[in-house]
Image (cartoon, rainbow, N blue to C red):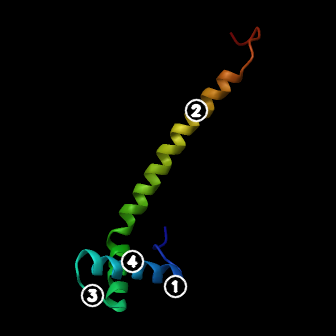
């Protein structure tokens, strides 16, 4: 897996969100450079945990839905001399 990477537009949005959070929740101003540094830190140190959790959630969803698909196939079968 490669590192989590954002486009420059995505990164600008995330940096703005960090700055907004600091201003509104912590009553602190944070500059763009510091916000980018913090974003890079979280990507490097915490991003993989979020990524893995997303994969686990997707895997669970697929497993649950695949069980539903298999059950639907059984329900679609017609009674014959071979299937009772």
Q: CA distance from mark 2 to mark 3?
A: 51 Å
In contact (CB < 8 Å): disc 1 and disc 3: no
- Residue at 43%, 78% (x, y): give it: 14
Graded by Cα atoms within 10 Å as few (under 14), some (14 to 19) or many (20 or more), the crowding at tag 2 reads few
Q: Which residue is mark 2?
A: 68
Secondary structure at badge 2 equals helix
Q: CA distance from mark 4 to mark 3?
A: 12 Å
Graded by Cα atoms within 10 Å as few (under 14), some (14 to 19) or many (20 or more), the crowding at tag 4 reads few
**Res. 29 mark:** 3
Q: CA distance from mark 1 to mark 3?
A: 22 Å
Q: Which residue is mark 1?
A: 8
**Res. 17 mark:** 4
Placement of the C terminus among the 4 image quadrants: top right
Q: CA distance from mark 1 to mark 4?
A: 14 Å
Label 1 or label 3, whichever comes before in sequence order? 1
Label 1 or label 4, whichever comes before in sequence order? 1
Secondary structure at badge 1 equals helix
């Amino acid at each position: 897996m490669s590192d989590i990477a954002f486009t420059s537009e995505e990164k600008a949005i995330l940096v703005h969100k960090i700055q907004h959070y600091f201003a509104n929740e912590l009553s602190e101003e944070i500059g763009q450079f510091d916000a980018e540094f913090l974003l890079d830190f979280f990507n490097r140190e915490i991003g993989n945990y979020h990524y893995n959790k997303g994969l686990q959630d997707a895997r669970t969803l697929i497993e649950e839905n695949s069980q539903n698909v298999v059950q639907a196939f059984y329900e679609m079968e017609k009674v014959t001399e071979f299937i009772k």
